[in-house]
Image (cartoon, rainbow, N blue to C red):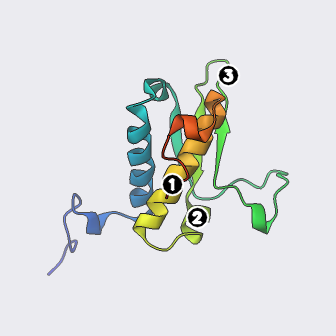
Amino acid sequence: MRGPVAPPQVPLAASRAETFADLVQDSVERLERRWPQLADIDFLVLDVPRLDGAAWSDEAVPLGGTVAAGEGRVARVVVYRRPVEIRTKGRDERAALVHEVVVEQVAELLGLTPETVDPRYGED
């Protein structure tokens, strides 16, 4: 029998990168209910952070980052997939860490504390 094991809409067919992107999207949707201005921010998933002269060590590899809005460019929040995956075991733990990273980065962009962005921050 030839063909895929499962149709594309079934989670079995989703790659790890797609599953991770879904976790980020779930977190953003959760926050957008409280912060509608997040619709104006781009949320991206990159595999790893860039090495362009960043001053970080093995112990301080970033899990996310922000890019402020500029001329003709909207603000961006980036979540780095591989560093998050390495630090988690299982989907629930990964979803919790993704949400924590998204909350921290949104807080940085908005100039707020993470607890203001999500009152449940840090409870997991």
- Residue type beneath disc 3: Gly
Q: Secondary structure at mark 2?
A: helix
| Residue type for callout 2 | Arg
Residue on which disc 2 sits:
82
State the residue in front, 90 or 3.
90
109 or 55: nearer the viewer: 109
Q: For mark 2, does the 10 Å Cα neighbourhood hold few (<14), some (14 to 19), or many (20 or more) residues?
A: some
Q: Nearer the viewer, mark 1 or mark 3?
A: 1
Pointer 2 and pointer 3: residues touching (CB < 8 Å)? Answer: no
Q: Can the viewer see residue 38?
A: yes
Q: Is residue 108 left or right of residue 88?
A: right
Judged from this view, the residue extending furthest toward the bottom is: 1
Q: Are marks 1 and 3 in contact (CB under 8 Å)?
A: no
Rendered location of residue 72, percent (x, y): 61, 19
The residue at the point 76 percent across, 61 percent down is 60
**3D distance between C-alphas at marks 1 and 3:** 34 Å
Q: Nearer the viewer, residue 41 or 117?
A: 117
Q: Residue at x 41, y 65 (%)?
A: 92
Q: Crowding near pointer 1: few (<14 within 10 Å), some, many (20+)?
A: few
User: Is residue 19 left or right of 79 when viewed as pictured?
Assistant: left
Of the residues under marks 1 and 3, which one precedes in the sequence? Answer: 3
Residue 96: give x, y in percent of width and height.
47, 58
Give residue 114's quadrant in the image: top right
Q: Earlier in the sequence, mark 2 or mark 3?
A: 3
Q: Residue at x 22, y 71 (%)?
A: 4
Left or right of 114 in this view: 52:
right
- At horizontal 54% and vertical 45% (from top left) the residue drawn is 102
Circle count: 3
Q: Where residue 123 is drawn, which disc sits there?
A: 1
Label 3: which residue? 70
Is 4 situated above or below 43? below
